[in-house]
Amino acid sequence: MNEEQRKAGSLDVIAQRNKKEKDYSQYFETVYQPPSLKEAKKRGKEDVQYNRDFQIDERFKEMGKGRTFFIKTFGCQMNAHDTEVMAGIFEALGYTLAEDILKADVILLNTCAIRENAENKVFSEIGNLKHLKRDRPDCLIGVCGCMSQEESVVNKILKSYQNVDMIFGTHNIHKLPEILEEAYMSKAMVIDVWSKEGDVIENLPKVRDDYFKAWVNIMYGCDKFCTYCIVPFTRGKERSRRPQDIIDEVRDLARQGYQEITLLGQNVNSYGKDLKDIEYDLGDLFEDISKIDIPRVRFTTSHPWDFTDHMIDVIAKGGNIVPHIHLPVQSGNDAVLKIMGRKYTRESYLDLVNRIKTAIPDVALTTDIIVGYPNETEEQFQETLSLYDEVEFEHAYTYLYSQRDGTPAARMKDNVEKEVKKDRLQRLNQKVGYYSERALKGYEGQVVTVLCEGSSKKDNEVLAGYTDKNKLVNFRGPKEVIGKLVDVKIDEAKQYSLNGTFLHVHEPSAVKA
Ligand code: 5AD
Ligand code: SF4
């Protein structure tokens, strides 16, 4: 994709902020185009370009001198990692991290659009920052991430949140220096949202949150278009990073002593499908990464449709790819799955689960479920409950269906009362709780390996970390083990976590090249 094509969906627009000076709705009619979900839906045939020459222009290098920044992150791991990249760009510009949001010179809200309540949280946060802008008019407030890609959100901010100085989206975070420059120079709101995805930019600076675990993007975007989901619109088409770029990044993390990485994508099982010149899929990537000396490799999120036997085989070998598979099912009923556009049936999902359990007997399976899809009947919901019993998931993230403007499901009429949906969610959550507790109980008396992440949230004297199957373990031990893999004997299962006794630092069984 060339610069012109990339800019096709871009709006390098400056919006007039001061309502009193101008009727800005008229003003925007001529110069302002909102980001377009319709444009974002289009899947062009252009090849993805890989830009490895990212550099911060010399003219920006002093921009952050004496200034601080703060990024508040909402939503998924992809956003958490984008925040690390934006923090890297801020530091390359000379900014330092503010100790708290209210003291920062630049505040970014990295937003999530997946459900309405996620968006409401962001709007209330922007509202909270209104007084800050009154007290310190020089501070800059920016909104970025998935919500910025929605025209309704941009319009609402323009109308009601004039304390916002800049809005930019998910496709142009590498343009942060230019966006900041424009915001400093102009008294108007800067809006720069690209409706269409751009190139894959390598070598962006990053400030990682941890020194022992790291996110590694393997692909961007999603082409699945599940009918309820806004992600294919806000994150654009599927674009895989080149295998070598990923492998180099993971090798570098291993060299720095990282203990755990998480391979990230909206739909990691599609990895490689868009790499036209090579035959290389997630199974191949797993194989290559399992040769690197990094103890734990997680991956998220999987789509059941693309889960191949090759991928299962590599995990079954018992290397560093963890035997924890998060496999969103969304519903246990075929008719609901069909209108969700999930492209698998209850039977094919259960078949996949059987293949996984046969090849990896100690696998931990977790899932996502949406309750109260438009017109979902009690019988259909019962099938979700019975599927849960059949699979015996160790945990699930459960959600009430939330209508997202622009998605096909938003046009469906819905005959299910909110109270009925809430009741179903509660019943499902009881089941989730039962199986989660049962899975935790099974650990009592066992020795598990835990990546110690720091002090527990509740008690500074207690350490906490996660097992390879993502079970939270609390234990007392020396603070020097933070960032290390340790063996812990489990004494007691609680409702959401395990309590144990520290034994020793974990001894790796084999050293890799
Ligand atoms: N309403 C409710 N839940 C949703 N999810 C995605 N879109 C919606 C929506 N519109 C859930 C799905 C997905 C998870 C990340 O969020 O379960 O797997
Ligand atoms: Fe959304 Fe996941 Fe479906 Fe993609 S695969 S549309 S991200 S739910």
Image: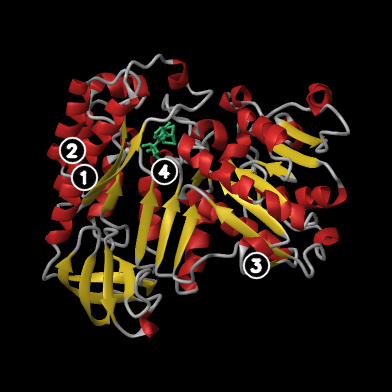
**Residue 204, how many percent across, how many down?**
64, 57
Q: Quadrant of ligand 1?
A: top left
Residue 304, by quadrant, is: top left
In this view of the protein, can residue 205 be seen by the observer? Answer: no
Q: Earlier in the sequence, mark 2 or mark 3?
A: 3
- Tell which of 311 and 144 is nearer to you: 144
Say which of marks 3 and 4 sits in front: 3
Instruction: Report, in whole angstroms, how far the alpha carbon at label 4 lies from the one at label 1.
Output: 25 Å
Q: From the viewer's perspective, tell me whether residue 440 is left or right of residue 420.
A: left
Instruction: Tell whether 342 sits left or right of 151.
Output: left
Question: Which residue has dot 3 on it?
Answer: 97
What residue does disc 4 label?
A: 268
Q: Secondary structure at mark 2?
A: helix
Instruction: Determine whether, in the image, residue 230 is placed left or right of residue 369.
Output: right
**Classed neighbour count for the residue bearing mark 1: other residues with Cα under 10 Å, few (<14), some (14–19), many (≥20):** many
Which mark's residue is nearer the viewer, 4 or 1? 1
Q: Is residue 7 visible?
A: yes
